[in-house]
Image (cartoon, rainbow, N blue to C red):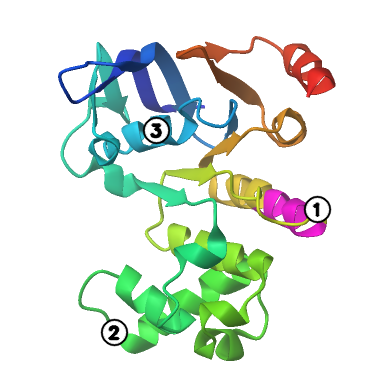
């Protein structure tokens, strides 16, 4: 598998006079067509790290330095982050409550588009994430959706730009067990069918063990890589 993203010796530091270190000396690789877990306790810096991957760490008032930060074998250049999509933790609150689902996709298209071709693309995306009655869904507003439905809409929106990397940030933490399995199975299928790399951010080692082939954990401001699934299994037993 080809390396999509490579990071060596990255530090995340507060952008103020205190210069607090949030993550230190991080090495990290994402390969194509792969599910990678990023585990850690609440507040450990998982979402901050995800934002740093997308060069949005300034939203946390943080800056980064690094030895290597490359995408597709090249040093990062402005606009590389368009190849990375993000699925947030809270599906219902992440959708705009005053516009219907169709409008979300229109806004997400970001530019001039042909309505017929866009509608075909939206339909294809929504079928891909498991919806059938597309016309009815597109007229609905977020409050009319269940949490699992809203999360599938967010995944479809994330796929609209045809990304190389998808970051799922605690994407099932607010869902019931049935919806959680549906979403995780869906992400696994999408990764296989598209050859898409997915970074699964979770506090639950059970999810990592069952769905991911590579595993990292943030602990004590360090990013640790597990060398085997046995190590993740031991973490699960303590969970």
Say which residue label 2 marks. 114
Which image quarter: residue 149? bottom right
Left or right position of 64 against 155? left
Q: In this view, does 42 lie above or below 188?
A: above
Distance, label 1 to label 3, CA atoms, is 26 Å
**Label 1: which secondary element:** helix
Of the residues under marks 1 and 3, which one precedes in the sequence? 3
Pick the residue in front: 97 or 178. Answer: 97
- Residues shaded magenta: 178-186
- Label of residue 177 in the image: 1
Q: What crowding class fits label 3: few (fewer than 14 Cα within 10 Å), some (14-19), or many (20 or more)?
A: many
How far separated are the C-alphas under marks 3 and 2? 37 Å
Q: Is residue 20 left or right of residue 186?
A: left
Image position, residue 32 (x, y; %): 49, 34
Point 45% across, 36% down: residue: 47
Residue 35: image location, x then y, percent: 60, 35
| Picture coordinates of residue 53, whole percent (x, y) | 35, 33
Between 8 and 237, which is closer to the camera in this rendering?
237
Question: Which residue position is annotated with label 3?
Answer: 48
Q: Which mark lies nearer to you, 1 or 2?
A: 1
Q: Which of marks 1 and 2 is nearer the N terminus?
A: 2
Secondary structure beneath label 2: loop
Q: Which of 156 and 46 is in front in this view?
A: 46
Q: Do the residues labelled 1 and 2 touch (CB within 8 Å)?
A: no
Query: What secondary structure is marked by label 3?
Result: helix
């Amino acid at each position: 598998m080809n390396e999509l993203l490579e990071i060596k010796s990255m530090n995340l530091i507060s952008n103020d006079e205190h210069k607090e270190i949030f993550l230190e000396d991080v090495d990290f690789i994402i390969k194509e067509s792969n599910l990678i877990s990023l585990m850690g306790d609440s507040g450990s810096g998982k979402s901050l790290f995800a934002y740093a991957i997308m060069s949005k760490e300034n939203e946390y008032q943080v800056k980064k330095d690094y030895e290597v930060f490359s995408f597709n074998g090249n040093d990062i250049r402005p606009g590389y982050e368009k190849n990375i999509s993000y699925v947030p933790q809270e599906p219902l609150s992440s959708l705009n409550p005053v516009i219907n689902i169709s409008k979300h996709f229109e806004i997400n298209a970001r530019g001039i588009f042909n309505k017929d071709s866009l509608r075909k693309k939206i339909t294809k995306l929504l079928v891909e994430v498991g919806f059938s009655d597309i016309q009815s869904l597109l007229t609905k507003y977020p409050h009319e959706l269940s949490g699992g439905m809203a999360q599938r809409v967010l995944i479809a929106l994330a796929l609209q730009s045809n990304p190389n990397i998808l970051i799922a940030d605690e994407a099932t933490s607010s869902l019931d067990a049935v919806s959680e399995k549906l979403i995780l199975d869906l992400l696994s299928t999408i990764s296989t069918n598209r050859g898409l790399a997915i970074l699964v951010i979770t506090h639950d080692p059970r999810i990592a063990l069952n769905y991911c082939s590579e595993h990292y954990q943030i602990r004590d401001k360090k990013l640790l890589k597990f060398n085997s699934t046995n190590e993740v299994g031991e973490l699960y037993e303590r969970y």
